[in-house]
Amino acid sequence: MSGLYHPKPGPNLPFGTKLNLKGYPLVPGQPDCSFYMKSKVCKFGSNCKFNHPENPENVPRDPSRDLSHYEAFRQHNKDRMDVSFFLCHFTKSEHPVNSQTGIFHDIRGFAYDRLESILTQKKVYDCVLPHLGAPVQAVCFTEMMLPSLSMHAEKYSPWGVAFHKSFLFNETRANQVLYCRDELFQSMKEKAKGDHDLLRYMTPFAPKYSEQLPQGTNPVDYSHEREWRTPGPVSFELENLAYVFVPDIRLFKELMPDLHTTLREGCGDQGYRKGG
Ligand SMILES: [Zn+2]
């Protein structure tokens, strides 16, 4: 390994090979590395040709770790009203009518269906980011506080999930988005040379108050969202969820009776109180 934080895949590996969070190669076409699967370490490091899954034993993260990080965060930020330890992902309804044929084609794809599949599959899937001009994918989260969050829910949907920052930071490669003014965005894009792991965290920033906005260009300013992104899909266990957002608990019970029961049993009264 060439460094603790910036290991590069070794010369044995094809160009573009990704490394897991510990710096071992992710090679989906290869069998899992037997050393790594047994001991969680591999002496070949970033040059091993076998696959090294992110979580070899598939052990779910102990939720008490995030609760203790949350407690420490709260102590540290107790006078700050504008920071949150939660990152929220709201689902979106897709227009159920095919824009080309005008035919009503797919009843699934409504916001609550998407939430149902997130909770059933215990996965939040990534999607293609707009504005990047390349098929870069990510799962997007917002750090907004409650008043803004309700406006956000109106734009997306009132269905969603939230995780503790510590969960997403430690279990995925979650990072805050870098909002870049035009010349910075262009130069960063050039330097990233198509590397999705860098491009994923950039977003253009051209606020209404910009005096350089060419005529006829629309402003792009999502900085109020304080967005975080992570490569997807994000896998989790239900006990890793900090919140589940629903517009109405009775509607939730009616649409997803099994999940309603599971979440209520799993989270106790405290979890049940949580809601949009
Ligand atoms: Zn190995």
Image (spheres, rainbow, N blue to C red):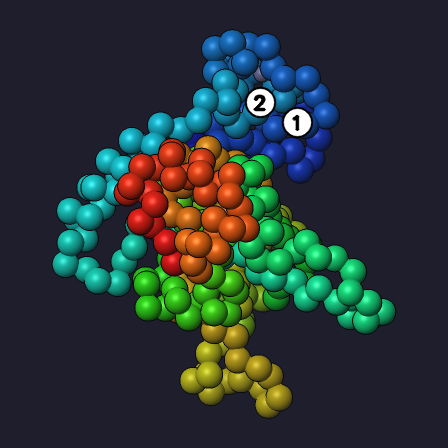
> The disc labelled 1 sits on which kind of residue?
Val
Look at mark 2 in the image and give the residue it sits on: 52
- Rendered image quadrant of residue 108: bottom right
Report the residue marked by disc 1.
27
* Image side of residue 222 versus residue 198, left or right: left
Please state which amino acid type lies under the numbered disc 2: His
Q: Quadrant of the C terminus?
A: bottom left
Is residue 197 visible to the viewer in this orientation of the structure? Answer: no
Query: Mark 2 and mark 1 in contact (Cβ < 8 Å)?
Result: yes
Q: Position of residue 123 (x, y in %)?
A: 55, 40
Q: Secondary structure at mark 1?
A: loop
Q: What residue is at 24 percent from the left and 35 percent from the top?
A: 68
Q: Quadrant of ligand 1?
A: top right
Q: Vertical placement of 14 versus 99: above or below?
A: above
> At 46% across and 78% down in the image, what residue appears?
207
Kindly tell me whether residue 96 is visible in this rendering: yes
Q: Position of residue 97 (x, y in %)?
A: 75, 67
| Above or below, 93 relative to 40 | below
Give the image location of residue 242, x and y in percent.
36, 44
- Please rate how many residues cluster around mark 1, counting C-alpha atoms within 10 Å: few if below 14, some from 14 to 19, many from 20: many
- Ligand 1 lies under 8 Å from the Cβ of mark 1: no
Q: How many marks?
A: 2
Image position, residue 111 (x, y; %)? 57, 57
Q: What residue is shown at x 34% (from left), y 45% (from top)?
A: 272
Distance of mark 1 from mark 2, alpha carbons?
Answer: 7 Å
Q: Who is closer to the viewer here, 25 or 260? A: 260
Question: Callout 2: few (<14), some (14-19), or many (20+) C-alpha neighbours within 10 Å?
Answer: many
Element type at mark 2: loop
